[in-house]
Image (tube, rainbow, N blue to C red):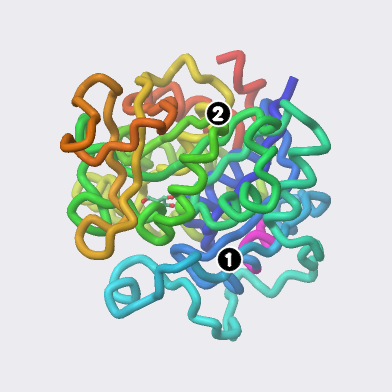
Amino acid sequence: MAAKIIFDTDIGWMNDDCMAAIFALKSPDLEVLGITPVMGNFDLNYSLLCALRLLELTGHEDVPVCRGFDRPLIHERGAYADKVWGKWALHEPVKDFPPGMPRLQADPRHASLFIAETVLAQPGEVTLVAVGPLTNVAMALRLYPEIARHVKEIVIMGGAIGRLPRGKGNITPAAEFNFWVDPEAARIVLHSGSPITLLPLNVCRRSHFSRALYLRIIDPASAYPEVAALYKQYIGPRFDDPELDRREPVLFYGVFDHACLGYVICPEIFTSVRMCVQVSVQPGLDYGVSHGYVKGDYVSGEDALPLESDLGAINVVYDMDFDHLAELYVAAVTGRAAANEL
Ligand code: BDR
Ligand code: CA
C-alpha cells in the first residue's frame, strides 16, 4: 500500500525540492496528501507559485497546497543569507514567473493546521517528509503536541553530523542550511518526542544527479512526457557542457531531498545509527549546528559537557546505496514500473 505523506518543502522551480516533489507525486509507493511550502532557499510567495504550477503541469491539481511560514521563528534574514542560498522573507511580489502563473489557488488552511488536522485524522498513518527549514512542522507540534504520538514518522533532510563521515556544514563551517535557517524550529521538532529519521548532509552527499540519470529521465518512451519535457527544458541546459557534470557534481545537481522519499519507500538501502541530536541556538558560529552523540559516549553531569541528557535518540541516516535510490527515482518519474519491485 502506498505510504501517505505530507511534503513540507522550500521548493524552487526545478530545484532539488521540485524534482523530489515530482518523484513523490509520480511514485506508486507514495500518496501525497498535501504540499506545505515554507520559506528557505526562496521567498514563500515564489515557493507557493512553484508548487501550484508544478501540480498543474504534472496533472496533480487535486493535491492541496497550503501556505506555510514566510520567515523563521527568530532568525532574521541578513546580508550573509542574501549572499548565499537563502532568499527568505523578501516579501516582494513575484513579477516574473517564467513557467507561467498558475491558475490553481492555494488551499485556505495554514500549512501547520493542515499538517495537524491531517495527522490527527489518521493516527499512525501519515509520514511528514520535511525537506526545508522546519518552521511549519515545529508550529504544528506547538499547536498540537499530540501529533508526536500520532504521526507515523517525521523524515527530515537537515543537519550535518560532524562525528559521522561527510559531516561538514554547507552554510557555515559546521551548520547545514535547513537547520541554520531556523535552528529554533529544528530544536522544537527534535525535542518533540516524535519518531524521527534524520537524513543529514552526510547521507545526501552520497547523491549525484548525473548526465546519465538526466538522459534516462527524458527517455522518449517515458510514460510521463510532461515530466520529461520539464527536465528537458529546465535541467537540460545545465548538461549542455558534459564536462560540467564532472567538475561540479554535487552543488548544482545534488538530489539531496530525494533521499528522504527513498527512505520512506525503501529504508533497506540506507544505513543508520541511533543518536541524540542537539541543535545549537547559540548566536554566532555555532548557530544551527547539529551535534550528534551516542548516549554513554560522554559523562553527562554537572561539570561535564553541556549535553541534554533527557534528549531521546533518533534514527540518523548516514549512508545509502545511491544507485538503488536512482533506480527508484527514474522508475517513478518515467512511470516504468512499481518502484518498490526493483
Ligand atoms: C538543503 O538545502 C536546500 O537547498 C536543499 O534543497 C536541501 O534541502 C541542503 O542543505
Ligand atoms: Ca530543500
Q: Looking at the rendering, which quadrant does residue 120 occupy?
A: top right
Q: CA distance from mark 1 to mark 2?
A: 28 Å
Which residue is under mark 2? 195
Please say if 113 is above or below 319.
below
Please say if 50 is above or below 210.
below
Residue drawn 61% across and 32% down?
A: 332
Residue drawn 40% across and 74% down?
A: 76
Q: Looking at the rendering, which quadrant does residue 26 occupy?
A: top right
Q: Looking at the rendering, which quadrant does residue 199 occupy?
A: top left
Residue drawn 43% across and 72% down?
A: 87
- Report x, y in % for residue 6: 67, 43
From this viewpoint, is residue 240 visible?
A: no
- Report x, y in % for residue 233: 52, 59
Please say if 210 is above or below 325.
below
Q: Which residues are magenta?
A: 49-55
Label 2 residue SS = loop
Camera-nearest residue between 5 and 187: 187
Beta carbon at label 1 within 8 Å of ligand 2: no
Task: Locate residue 11 relative to residue 273 in the image: left or right.
Answer: right
Please tell me whether mark 1 or mark 2 is closer to you in this view.
2
Label 1 residue SS = helix
From this viewpoint, is residue 236 visible?
A: yes
Camera-nearest residue between 267 and 230: 267
How would you rate the neighbour count of disc 1 (Cα within 10 Å): few for under 14, some for 14-19, many for 20 or more?
Answer: many
- Report x, y in % for residue 124: 72, 26
Which residue is under mark 1? 47
Q: First in sequence: mark 1 or mark 2? A: 1
Q: Is residue 202 magenta?
A: no
- Report x, y in % for residue 128: 62, 39
